C-alpha cells in the first residue's frame, strides 16, 4: 500500500491537480525545520528549567524534548518524551535530585518533519538537603552524647566518626563523608545493636542511612561516588529475552530509605521497628502483620487457550547488603472517610507472631506469579518480586541488588491476542497490549478474528426509556464526532422483559461484545440506580460487573470503560448531556482555562511513633505534590489549596523525607486553604480539579467543601473534570442502598450535584461510591495522572496518552492492581483493599469524554482531504474497494471514514495520518457507488467533518 501511495502522489503532481496549499504542504513537504537555538538546562531543587528559541520556519508546529538519565538521548526514539508542544520553556519537575539528566530538543513542522537535535544537560540538587545533613549530624551528636545506653567508649567512637564525616562534608568531600558513614558509623550501629543499646542502635542506623541519602541529594555529580549510585534509583524490570514460550526478566533495586517507629499499642511496649522504603517498590500492602519487605510488581500476558499454566523459575538473587533490624510489619490500610471510627489514626497495631517467631525467610519465594484475569482477549498475570528476604528470628534482612527469574508458558494455542484487538475501533485494546512486560511477543502472535454476527458499536449507550431523548442527542453528537454509538433502552419498571435486572443488562453488554464486528469499548448507563440497577458486592454499590466479561469477584482487569450519568428526570439528563456536548463540540475560548489546575489536599499530622515531629500520617500531600509536578511539567499553572490537622508544623512525608522547600516552615506556607479558595478557583475557570483527602457522601473533608458549595457555583461553561480522591463522594445509589451511610432515597449527593448543576459544576468526575482504602487511593491517582501524561510513571503503561475518562479510570485501576496486588500468602489484602478498589471507583459522567489538556482553539486543522480507493475489484458487476488512501495535512489526525449506504450511515474504516497519509483498510467491502464522508479527530482540538476529493 505504501508503494501505491507513493505512485499516487507522483501521479497527482504530474497531473497538476489543484490541492489546498496546506494539504500540499502537509503531504509533500519533506524539508525539516531549522534547529532549536539557545537550548539551555538550569538545575533547581527537584526541577530542571529548560529554555530555547524556536526556529523561524513558517510551518513550525512545535518542539519535542526527550530526556534520558545518565546519557545523551541521541536516537530519535531514545529516552522519555517529556514535551511536544509550542512554547519556549518548560519546568521539568519529574526529576530526582542528584541524578544527571540529558535533554535533546528537536523542532518539528506540520508535515511531521523533525530537525536535527540540540542538547543540554543538568543535575537537580536539593537546597534543603545540605541544611538537613548538618542538622541531622548535630542532632545525632547530641543524642549520642546524652545516651545512657552507651558506654563512654562507645559514645566517643560514634562521635569521632560523626565529627569526621561532618568535616569531610563541609570541606566539599561528600563522597568521603558518605563512605565513612557507611563503612564505620553504620557498621558500629550494627555492632551496638547486638548489645544492650538495641533500641538506640536501631534509631542510629536508620538516621545514618538517611544522612547518606541526603548527602547524595546535595550532589550534582552523585555518579562519581560508586557507593551512592543506587540511592534514589527506582526499581525497574529488564526483559532479557521474550518468546511465545516465556520470558527471562530481571528486577533491579535501588538503595533503601529507613525510618524507625515506636508503635504505642505494640504488644511489647518500647519495641522499636525499622520500616524500609525502596524507590519504585511497595512496602505498604500485603498480609497484615507480616514483615513489610518491599515488593515490585509488573503485568505479563500469557497465551490464550485452555489449560494454560504459568511457571516461574527463580535464579539466585544478587545480594546487595545484609542488615540486622526489627522489620516493621504490614498494617491494614486506613480509610479515607471523613467520619472515621479511629479519628484518621492507623488501625490497631498488627504483628503476626507466628511469622516473627520463625526463622523461615519472608517471603518464602523471592519471585511469584498469580493470575489476574482476562482483559478483552488477553490473559493477564501479575509477577511479584521481593526486594529482599527477612529472617525474623535473627532480625536479618538480606536486600537484593537484582533478582533474575524465568517465566515459562505451558499450553495454550500460541496466540496472545486476536485481530479484533488490532481493530482501530477496539479503542482501549492498544493500551492493554502495551501494558505488559512481553508486549513485543503479544503484538507478534495474533490469532484470526472472532466470528461476528452483528455490526455493533464502540460506544454502547444504555438508557431508561424516560431518558431516551437525551440519550439519542448524545448518540448523534458522538457519531458526528466520529465515535460509532448506539442507544438501547433498559431498566426497571419497564416492559423490556429481558433488559430489567442488572444481570439482564450485563448479559446484553456481553452479547454485544461477543457478536459484534465493532465491539463495545465504552458503556454508558444513563439513569440513576432506581432506573438502571447497580450491583452490590461487600455492601458497595458498584457498576464494576458491567466493566468485566469474566467473574467480577475474581477478574481484576477491566474489559470495558463504563460510566454512569445518575439522573432522575429527563430535564436533568438533558442538562448533563448538553454540558458534555458543549464541552467537546464548542470548548470555552479562554486560553487561561486550559493552563490552570487546582490541587486541594490535607497534611494530616502526625504519624504515630515517628522519630521526627511533623511527619505526615498519610500520603495525601505527597501524592498531591506528585500530581502537581506532573502538571507543572506539562506547562500548567497549579494552585495549591492545602489544609492541615494536628499540632505540629508539617515537615516530612510519611517515609520521613522532607517536604518540598515551598511547603517548609522557612517559607511560611500557610496551610489554611478552605472552601472560599476552592470556589474562587472553580468559578475563575480551571480545566482540572483534584482533591486528595478524606470525604463523605456530602463532600470533602479538608479543605472542607460540600454539596451546598457546589450548588452555589457560577462557573457556567468553564467546566472542569474533577478527580475526587477520597471516600464516598461518588455515592449515587441512595435510592436502592437501604439508607447506607445515612443517605435517604430523595437525597442528592456530592458527585451527582456537581454533574447535574445547570449553572456550572463539573462536566464529569471520577469518585468512589463508598469508603475507600487510603494507600490504594493515592496509587490510583498516580495511575490517573500517568494515563494523561505518560511520563508520570515512565516504567508503567504506554506512551500513548489516554484522555477519555473511562480509559483514565481503567488505567488507574490497572496500576493499582499491578502495584498493590498481593503479598505471598497475602489473600486478605487482595480480597479486601484491592478488590474493593475495583468495585468502588466510578466515572460519574461520560466515559468517552475527552479531557482538554491544551487550548483547543490554537490547534490548526484543515477542512479538506484527497483520497483514492485501494484494492479495487468488480464483484457481481459492482465496483468494490477494500481500503482507502487519504492525503491530509495534519500529522497525527485520526480519520474515521463513513459509508453513506442505502439505509444508514455506517463507519467502515479508521486510520491515523503519518507523513501526510492515512492508509485505511475497510471493515468490509465498500461499493464505490455509495458516497463517503470522513471525520477527523485531533489531539486537543474539536472533531471536524472533512470535505473529500477523489484523486
Image (spheres, rainbow, N blue to C red):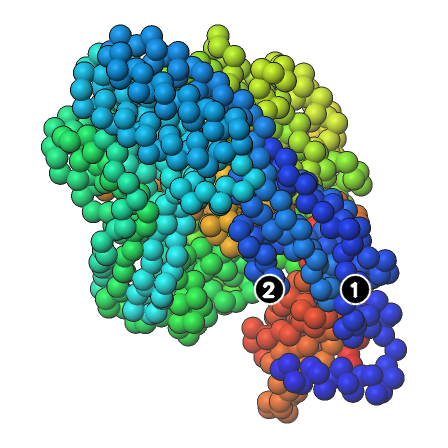
Q: Position of residue 361 (x, y in %)?
A: 17, 40
- Number of numbered discs visible in the structure rendering: 2
Decide which of 220, 413 is in the foreground and name it.
220
Decide which of 789, 905 is in the foreground and name it.
789
The vertical placement of 386 against 599, above or below, is: below
Pointer 2: residues within 10 angstroms few (<14), some, or many (20+)?
A: few
Q: From this viewpoint, is residue 741 visible?
A: no
The vertical placement of 618 against 221, above or below, is: above
Q: At x 34% / y 11%, what residue is drawn?
A: 145
Q: Which residue is mark 2?
A: 75
Query: From the viewer's perspective, is 235 left or right of 359?
Result: right
Q: Which residue is mark 1?
A: 33
Q: What label does residue 107 carry, if any?
A: none
Q: At x 79% / y 64%, what residue is drawn?
A: 33
The vertical placement of 326 against 910, above or below, is: above
Decide which of 255, 665 is in the foreground and name it.
255
Tell me the quadrant of the picture where the C terminus can be found.
bottom right
Q: Are marks 1 and 2 in contact (CB under 8 Å)?
A: no
Q: CA distance from mark 1 to mark 2?
A: 18 Å
Amino acid at each position: 500500500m505504501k508503494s501505491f501511495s507513493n505512485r499516487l502522489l507522483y501521479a497527482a503532481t504530474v497531473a497538476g491537480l489543484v490541492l489546498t496549499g496546506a494539504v500540499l504542504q502537509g503531504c509533500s513537504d519533506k524539508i525539516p525545520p531549522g534547529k532549536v537555538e539557545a537550548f539551555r538546562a538550569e538545575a533547581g531543587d527537584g526541577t530542571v528549567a529548560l529554555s530555547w528559541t524556536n526556529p523561524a520556519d513558517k510551518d513550525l508546529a512545535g518542539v519535542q524534548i526527550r530526556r534520558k538519565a545518565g546519557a545523551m538521548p541521541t536516537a530519535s526514539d531514545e529516552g522519555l518524551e517529556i514535551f511536544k508542544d509550542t512554547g519556549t520553556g518548560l519546568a521539568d519537575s519529574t526529576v530526582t535530585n542528584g541524578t544527571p539528566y540529558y535533554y535533546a530538543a528537536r523542532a518539528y513542522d506540520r508535515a511531521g518533519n523533525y530537525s536535527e537535535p540540540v542538547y543540554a544537560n543538568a543535575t537537580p540538587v536539593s537546597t534543603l538537603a545540605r541544611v538537613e545533613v548538618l542538622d541531622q549530624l548535630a542532632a545525632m551528636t547530641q543524642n549520642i552524647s546524652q545516651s545512657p545506653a552507651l558506654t563512654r567508649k562507645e559514645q566517643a567512637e560514634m562521635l569521632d566518626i560523626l565529627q569526621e564525616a561532618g568535616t569531610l562534608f563541609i570541606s566539599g568531600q561528600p563522597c568521603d563523608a558518605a563512605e565513612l558513614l557507611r563503612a564505620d558509623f553504620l557498621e558500629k550501629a550494627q555492632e551496638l545493636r547486638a548489645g544492650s543499646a538495641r533500641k538506640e542502635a536501631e534509631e542510629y542506623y536508620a538516621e545514618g542511612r538517611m544522612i547518606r541519602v541526603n548527602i547524595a541529594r546535595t550532589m550534582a555529580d552523585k555518579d562519581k561516588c560508586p557507593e551512592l549510585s543506587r540511592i534514589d534509583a527506582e526499581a525497574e524490570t529488564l526483559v532479557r529475552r521474550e518468546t511465545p514460550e516465556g520470558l527471562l526478566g530481571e528486577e533491579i533495586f535501588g538503595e533503601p530509605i529507613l525510618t524507625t517507629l515506636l508503635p504505642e499499642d505494640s504488644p511489647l511496649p518500647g519495641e522499636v521497628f525499622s520500616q524500609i522504603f525502596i524507590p519504585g517498590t511497595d512496602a505498604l500492602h500485603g498480609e497484615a502483620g507480616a514483615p513489610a519487605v518491599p515488593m515490585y510488581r509488573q503485568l505479563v500476558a500469557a497465551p490464550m487457550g485452555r489449560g494454560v499454566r504459568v511457571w516461574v523459575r527463580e535464579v539466585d538473587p544478587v545480594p546487595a547488603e545484609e542488615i540486622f533490624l526489627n522489620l516493621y510489619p504490614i498494617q491494614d490500610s486506613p480509610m479515607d472517610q471523613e467520619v472515621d471510627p479511629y479519628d484518621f489514626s492507623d488501625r490497631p497495631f498488627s504483628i503476626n507472631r507466628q511469622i516473627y517467631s520463625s526463622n523461615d525467610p519472608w517471603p518464602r519465594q523471592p519471585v511469584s506469579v498469580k493470575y489476574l484475569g482476562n482483559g478483552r482477549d488477553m490473559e493477564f498475570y501479575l509477577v511479584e518480586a521481593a526486594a529482599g528476604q527477612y529472617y525474623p528470628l535473627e532480625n536479618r534482612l538480606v536486600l537484593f541488588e537484582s533478582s533474575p527469574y524465568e517465566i515459562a508458558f505451558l499450553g495454550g494455542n500460541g496466540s496472545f491476542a486476536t485481530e479484533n484487538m488490532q481493530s482501530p475501533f477496539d479503542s482501549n485494546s492498544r493500551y492493554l497490549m502495551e501494558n505488559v512486560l512481553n508486549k513485543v511477543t503479544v503484538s507478534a502472535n495474533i490469532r484470526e478474528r472472532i466470528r461476528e454476527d452483528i455490526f455493533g458499536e464502540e460506544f454502547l449507550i444504555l438508557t431508561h426509556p424516560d431518558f431516551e431523548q437525551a440519550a439519542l442527542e448524545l448518540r448523534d453528537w458522538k457519531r458526528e464526532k466520529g465515535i460509532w454509538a448506539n442507544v438501547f433502552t433498559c431498566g426497571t419498571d419497564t416492559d423490556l422483559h429481558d433488559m430489567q435486572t442488572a444481570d439482564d443488562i450485563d448479559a446484553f453488554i456481553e452479547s454485544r461484545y461477543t457478536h459484534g464486528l465493532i465491539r463495545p469499548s465504552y458503556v454508558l448507563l444513563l439513569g440513576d440506580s432506581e432506573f438502571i440497577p447497580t450491583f452490590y458486592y461487600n455492601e458497595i454499590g458498584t457498576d464494576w460487573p458491567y466493566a468485566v466479561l469474566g467473574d467480577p469477584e475474581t477478574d481484576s482487569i477491566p474489559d470495558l470503560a463504563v460510566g454512569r450519568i445518575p439522573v432522575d428526570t429527563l430535564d436533568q439528563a438533558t442538562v448533563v448531556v448538553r454540558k458534555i456536548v458543549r464541552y467537546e463540540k464548542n470548548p470555552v475560548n479562554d486560553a487561561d482555562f486550559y493552563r490552570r489546575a487546582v490541587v486541594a489536599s490535607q497534611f494530616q499530622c502526625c504519624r504515630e511513633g515517628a522519630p521526627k515531629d511533623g511527619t505526615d500520617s498519610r500520603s495525601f500531600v505527597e501524592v498531591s505534590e506528585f500530581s502537581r509536578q506532573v502538571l507543572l511539567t506539562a506547562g500548567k499553572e497549579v494552585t495549591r489549596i492545602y489544609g492541615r490537622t494536628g499540632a505540629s508544623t508539617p515537615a516530612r512525608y510519611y517515609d520521613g523525607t522532607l517536604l518540598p522547600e515551598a511547603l517548609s516552615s522557612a517559607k511560611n506556607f500557610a496551610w489554611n486553604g478552605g472552601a472560599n479558595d476552592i470556589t474562587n478557583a472553580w468559578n475563575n475557570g480551571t480545566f482540572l480539579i483534584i482533591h486528595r483527602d478524606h470525604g463523605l457522601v456530602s463532600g470533602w473533608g479538608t479543605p472542607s467543601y460540600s454539596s451546598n458549595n457546589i450548588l452555589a457555583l457560577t462557573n457556567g461553561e468553564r467546566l472542569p473534570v474533577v478527580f475526587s480522591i477520597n471516600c464516598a463522594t461518588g455515592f449515587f445509589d441512595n435510592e436502592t442502598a437501604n439508607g447506607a451511610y445515612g443517605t435517604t432515597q430523595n437525597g442528592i449527593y456530592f458527585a451527582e450535584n456537581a454533574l447535574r448543576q445547570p449553572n456550572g459544576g463539573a462536566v464529569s468526575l471520577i469518585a468512589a461510591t463508598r469508603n475507600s482504602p487510603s494507600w490504594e487511593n493515592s496509587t490510583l491517582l498516580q495511575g490517573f495522572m500517568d494515563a494523561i501524561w505518560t511520563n508520570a510513571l515512565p516504567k508503567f503503561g504506554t506512551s500513548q496518552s489516554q484522555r477519555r475518562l473511562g480509559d483514565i479510570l481503567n488505567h488507574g485501576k490497572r496500576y493499582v492492581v499491578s502495584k498493590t496486588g498481593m503479598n505471598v500468602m497475602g489473600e486478605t489484602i487482595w480480597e479486601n483493599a484491592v478488590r474493593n478498589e475495583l468495585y468502588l471507583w466510578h466515572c460519574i459522567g461520560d466515559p468517552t469524554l475527552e479531557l482538554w489538556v491544551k487550548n483547543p482553539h490554537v490547534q490548526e486543522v484543515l477542512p479538506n482531504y484527497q483520497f483514492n480507493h485501494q484494492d479495487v475489484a468488480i464483484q457481481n458487476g459492482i465496483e468494490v474497494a477494500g481500503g482507502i488512501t487519504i492525503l491530509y495535512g495534519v500529522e497525527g489526525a485520526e480519520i474515521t471514514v463513513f459509508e453513506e449506504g442505502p439505509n444508514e450511515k455506517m463507519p467502515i474504516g479508521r486510520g491515523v495520518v503519518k507523513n501526510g497519509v492515512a492508509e485505511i483498510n475497510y471493515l468490509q467491502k465498500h461499493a464505490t457507488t455509495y458516497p463517503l464522508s470522513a471525520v477527523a479527530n485531533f489531539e486537543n482540538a474539536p472533531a471536524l467533518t472533512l470535505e473529500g476529493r477523489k484523486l
